[in-house]
């Protein structure tokens, strides 16, 4: 009997590949989700929405952190001018 072989997914379509891509390049990994034949349309939309929300949140967090650092260094350099 001939066993019917399933076509194997490419490494970049495997779940671990997509997770690693998201951890390395963030939202730039979304095309891997959209071109993946194993994911349903609903899954693709949910992953995209979560990625957009998370990217916005992390971007806002980064901007607030940079603003705080700028204020902190402004205070340090302003006080060092006295000496």
Image (cartoon, rainbow, N blue to C red):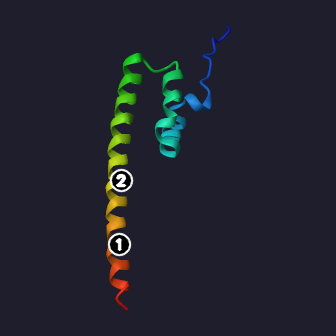
Residue located 35% across and 33% down the image: 50
Q: Earlier in the sequence, mark 1 or mark 2?
A: 2
**Residue designated by label 2:** 63
Q: Position of residue 49 (x, y in %)?
A: 35, 29
Give the residue displayed 39% in from the left and 29% down from the top.
47
Q: Which of label 1 and label 2 is nearer to you?
A: 1
> Image height check: is 6 above or below 19?
above
Tell me what residue is drawn at x 53 percent, y 28 percent: 32
Q: Residue at x 36, y 66 (%)?
A: 69
- Circle 1 SS class: helix
Q: Quadrant of the N terminus?
A: top right
| Residue 16 versus residue 59 in the image, above or below | above
Residue 70, given in percent of the width and then of the height, sits at 36, 66
> Marks 1/2: CA distance?
16 Å
Report the front residue among 13 and 56. 56
Write down the residue under mark 1: 74
Q: Position of residue 37 (x, y in %)?
A: 52, 18
């Amino acid at each position: 009997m001939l066993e019917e072989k399933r076509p194997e997914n490419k490494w970049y379509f495997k779940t671990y590949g997509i997770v690693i891509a998201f951890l390395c390049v963030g939202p730039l990994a979304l095309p891997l989700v959209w071109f993946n034949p194993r994911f349903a349309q609903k899954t693709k939309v949910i992953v995209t929405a979560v990625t957009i929300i998370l990217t916005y949140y992390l971007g806002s967090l980064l901007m607030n952190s940079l603003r705080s650092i700028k204020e902190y260094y402004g205070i340090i350099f302003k006080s060092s001018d006295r000496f």
